[in-house]
Image (cartoon, coloured by chain):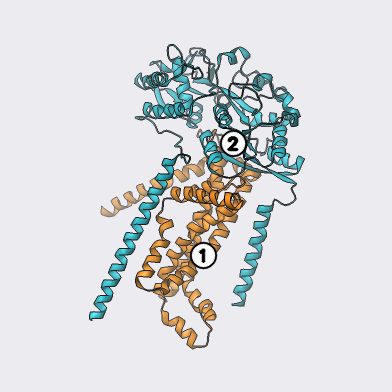
Amino acid sequence: MKKLTVLLTCVIIVLSSLTFTACSGSGYEGEVNVYNWGEYISPGDDETLDVIAEFERRYNIKVNYTNFETNEELYNVLVNSNSSYDVIIPSDYMVARLRSEGMLEKIDLGNIPNYKNIDEKFRISDFDPTGEYSVAYSWGIVALVYNTTMIPEGEITGFKDMWNPKYRNDVLMFNNSRDAMAIAMQVCDPPIDPGSESFTGEDIDRATKKLIELKNCGSLKKYVMDQVFTEMEGSQSALAAYYGGDIYTMLDNNEELSYSLPEEGSNLFIDSMCIPTCCQNKENAELFINFMCDPEIAAANADYICYGTPNKAALELMDDDYKESPLCNPPQEYIDKCYTFANIDDQIYSEMQEKFVKACSSTAEVSSIEIKTTSVESKIAVAVILAIVVIATVIVIILDIRRAVKNRGRINKI
Amino acid sequence: MKKKSQKIYLAIIMAFLYAPIIYLIAYSFNDGKTSVWKGFTMKWYTALFQDAQIMGSLYNTLLVAILASVIATVLGTAAAIGIYNFKGGVRSAIQNVSNIPIINPEIVTGVSLMLLFTFAGTMLGFEMGFWTVLLAHIGFCTPYVILNVTPRIRQMDASLYEAALDLGCSPMQAFFKVVLHELLPGILSGFLISFTYSLDDFVITYFTRGSRFQTLPIQIYTMTHQRINPKANALSALMFLVILVILIISNVVSAKKDKEAVR
């Protein structure tokens, strides 16, 4: 008995001391809550710089770093929970949506001296015309990668080649509606510009038809995301569309591969750092953004992520291989041909998603299933399931009680 | 003939169950970032332990798992004994109600907890984080403990407790010296199950974690954003090993207990 009490007290003391260190963040002068994509910051193993630890060391501010998986997830969390985030890193169209819904705080650029390092062309954009709500973090384009043992070098010039029946069962397409639809729109004749005023549901139908055609002409192998690395680096497929920075790493791993910037132009994506209105440490948030714009830090991140860096000074620090690769650092003439997904209406976006699921339904698993906790429907769904469970339990209980009563009756008779 | 076909059937089932895990463990030693084999390496394991993010999440996960399973074990054991002392209909009613968290789909529990915590948080001025995750974990672990302890109570001879009282124990002493000892196997297995459930819970943690708190399963999930980082393989392999060790220990313990009981 005594032993047990002693043991219990010991356990409680140890555990409570553990919890205290977990929660108080001892010794830091403040904190900043950062919400970023997974695998989107230099993590600090053998060859890389630990960016977060470096920030904590320099400013003595604790970074609470958490990750999200899709833009929609980020949005849902911001809308539904009362958690405070100080720095978030959404993509272009999500910045536009958050801004238009008044969920972003203006960033005081006066507090971000390193903003001077950001290239002018990334300061103002369709999704943030005044440049006051976002500071670009990373950017890239969609490009094509192909295997030169299966397709002669130079034969691939644009997205339209993906529709060539010659490459039978050899072409990989994005398994997410945004990128797949964007490619289909560009191949349509005439091409569809999703940013234009005249963009309607009909255009989505045309793009959907084009996607179905990709399957029907026999060239499509499957819709993939991460699997593209295995397929291309393992020489299992001939042609794929994917993000430029990732193709850059693929080329490193398989010498048979070559790439092409699609002649139609491409989708330019920009992920930016923003401060949401639920922010509670704005000063620290700006300090963090400024830190991320530091040339050395930005270069370390770019080196790890391999996407383009909007930071001019950081670009100077990168090795020539990266600087000269059009995949990571496309020439200006090419960027002019690209477009961003800026102001896509929420409704049109979900329509695109639905149509895409239809277009690939017979072959593919669709990657991101959204849990839309925002909508009333989902709350009702949750309530209904809960009700079913409760009702089932109640029925079981009633049956149990009945049986018990019956048994008792029997016993009494005996 | 029959034996052979039985064995083949078993082998197929085993292969089906364990092939993915073996594949994952094998590729955590692959010197390359994809499923193209490029040679043996331990570098992902070293990289894993150098990654401060992952180590932080590991610490959080373990902390929550230990605390939640300890508290759930205490609560669950007490609840099981309490429930047993009710009679007839009331007992079965409480027992069934206590099973709701097990039957309930995780996603429903997660979403409703998030809504509750958010609502309560705005009223009382707190944010979701470590404490809400801990509460949620205790919530879904406790029923498993009750489920494991109840049959032990049923098996226990009630006269043991009475005998202890007759022989001069106070009720407290009787509980700790006699009842607890009898229930220990059930309590231990309840504890281990809670621990493993808490360790690998994704859905409920995901909804209740807030902006300052991240556990390993969530970290692994987001690691797949760009491509599956081999570090995630290494990490999953280690987690699998930990769970395996726990399982083996619990089986060995219960096997020993059974042997003693036979004697």
Looking at the image, residue A300 sits to the left or right of residue B41; the answer is right
Disc 1 designates what residue? Answer: B73
Q: Chain of mark 1?
A: B
Q: Which one is nearer the viewer's eye here, B28 or B126?
A: B126
Q: Position of residue B107 (x, y in %)?
A: 45, 47
Disc 2 designates what residue? Answer: A39
Tell me whether circle 1 and circle 2 mark residues in contact (CB < 8 Å).
Answer: no
Q: Which element carries disc 1, helix, strand or loop?
A: helix
Q: Position of residue A86 (x, y in %)?
A: 65, 39
Question: Which of the 4 image quadrants contains residue A322?
Answer: top right
Q: Which one is nearer the viewer's eye here, B166 or A305?
A: B166
Q: Which one is nearer the viewer's eye here, A393 or B219?
A: A393
Q: Which residue: 26% across, 72% down? A: A406
* Residue B245 in view: no
Q: Which residue: 40% across, 69% down? A: B151
**Dot 1 amino acid type:** Thr
Question: Which of the 4 image quadrants contains residue B81?
Answer: bottom left
In the orientation shown, which residue stands out farthest toward the left?
A413
Q: Is residue A295 above or below residue A21?
A: above
Q: Position of residue A53 (x, y in %)?
A: 71, 41
**Dot 2 amino acid type:** Glu
Q: Which chain is cyan?
A: A
